[in-house]
Image (tube, rainbow, N blue to C red):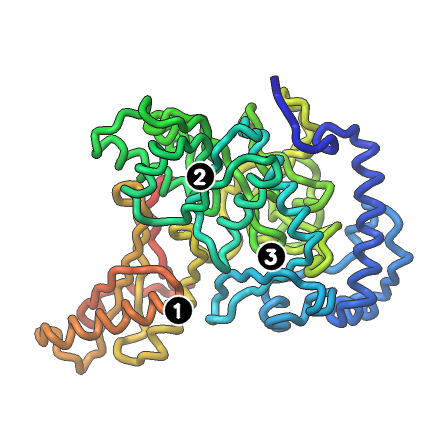
Amino acid sequence: MERYWNPVETAPLHELRALQSLRLSQTVRHVYEHVPFYRKKFDEMGIKPEDIQSIDDISKLPFTYKQDLRDNYPYGLFAVPVEDLVRIHASSGTTGKQTVVGYTQNDIDIWGNCCGRALTAAGGDASDFVHVSYGYGLFTGGLGLHAGAEEIHATVIPVSSGNTKRQIQIFKDFGSTILCCTPSYALFLGESLREMGIDKSEISLKAGVFGAEPWSEEMRHKIEELLGIKAYDIYGLSEVMGPGVAFECSEQTGMHVNEDHFYPEIIDPDTGEVLPEGEVGELVFTCITKEALPLIRYRTRDIASLSREKCSCGRTLIKMKKPSGRTDDMLIIRGVNVFPSQVEAVLLELGDTAPHYMLIVDRVDNLDTLEIQVEMKEDMEFDAVRLVEETEAKIKAAVASTLGISAKVTLLPPKSLARSEGKAVHVIDKRKI
């Protein structure tokens, strides 16, 4: 029998709409009074808070872009004084500046409730040991699911990422029942379990909640087979909250959006026009309960669709399809956001190579890999092995420092990368996702 953590998950649509309308009008007034950026935008468009009476009025409001967060770095879009903040998180940006997110205690409580819903949908309850292998720190993954586990009164095992043999030992010794990590790491854990000669019957895992990177149905089945679990998808993004914006139920035909907190829209990415239910377009979220960083019509750049078809789990929350791509060039590698322009900025700053490069993304032994191929300068001696190795090592260190991710660096002879007459192609993604 399906269980729910919060009654709103099965609320009738008319009750949900009334709640969304009230919360949107309150949020609009909140940002108008406390965020100069939004007050200026609203005034320019001739919008007053009293003009927004219903959720149907949301299309009157302006969009917010990731660049707006960068332009107001670090705290310019916050709607509360720093005394009311209890935590800061951040995600990477294209220019080295991070996208900074703030939370009040109420924001943290809501986040925990949303992640609690996701864990409950995956079969979690107070009897479970939730093994969190997402990274802890400025990345939102670890602490988000940690709060969700505490919300449902489960026991948290805050392992964080890495040290795979130790993770598997903890599976056995501590009796972990629900695993939370990236899907690629879950697959790696499963393969490692097999290589270590440990049968999946020797561990107690029953479910996994996986997100932070794209993954396929084939990958889901492989994870389930290797670990003997049911694998659930979870969606989120730092700017909106973190993991728990949407989550899968037992039906697994899309993710229920926690739309009592995050109102979703699908728009035409070129015109900004709101598209009808079921059509594919860019996913947009408005935070209708957040206090510290309540973003209005935030353009995620994720391509998805929404559906209110009746779900067998009993939840009435709208469903979003797994994002099928992005409208920008961002890559997600091992849960880290990587933009080609970040790599380009590193190369140009070092100035040791020509400005021609290619990023090769692949999945080897179920873990994402990144290779940076970059051309040498015309006057560089390609046969000077030591010089080549030193330059590769220098670039590798700079990329790791800037992006927070390791990469293989390969120097190529001048003019060896293909040139394009149109938009330059800088990425080859070989992953089957």
Q: Identify the residue at image location x=48%, y=71%.
A: 95
Give SS at disc 2: strand
Can you tell which of label 2 and label 3 is closer to the viewer?
A: 2
From the image, tell me which residue sits under label 1: 402
Give SS at disc 3: loop
Of callouts 1 and 2, which one flags the residue occurring earlier in the amino acid sequence? 2
Disc number placed over residue 305 in the picture, else none: none
Label 2 to label 3, Cα distance in Å?
Answer: 25 Å
Q: Are marks 1 and 2 in contact (CB under 8 Å)?
A: no
Task: Give percent across and percent down for residue 46.
Answer: 86, 66
Q: Amino acid at mark 3?
A: Glu
Q: Identify the residue at image location x=30%, y=41%.
A: 366
Q: Quadrant of the N terminus?
A: top right
Disc number placed over residue 131 in the picture, else none: 2
Task: Give percent across and percent down for residue 234.
Answer: 53, 39
From the image, tell me which residue sits under label 3: 239
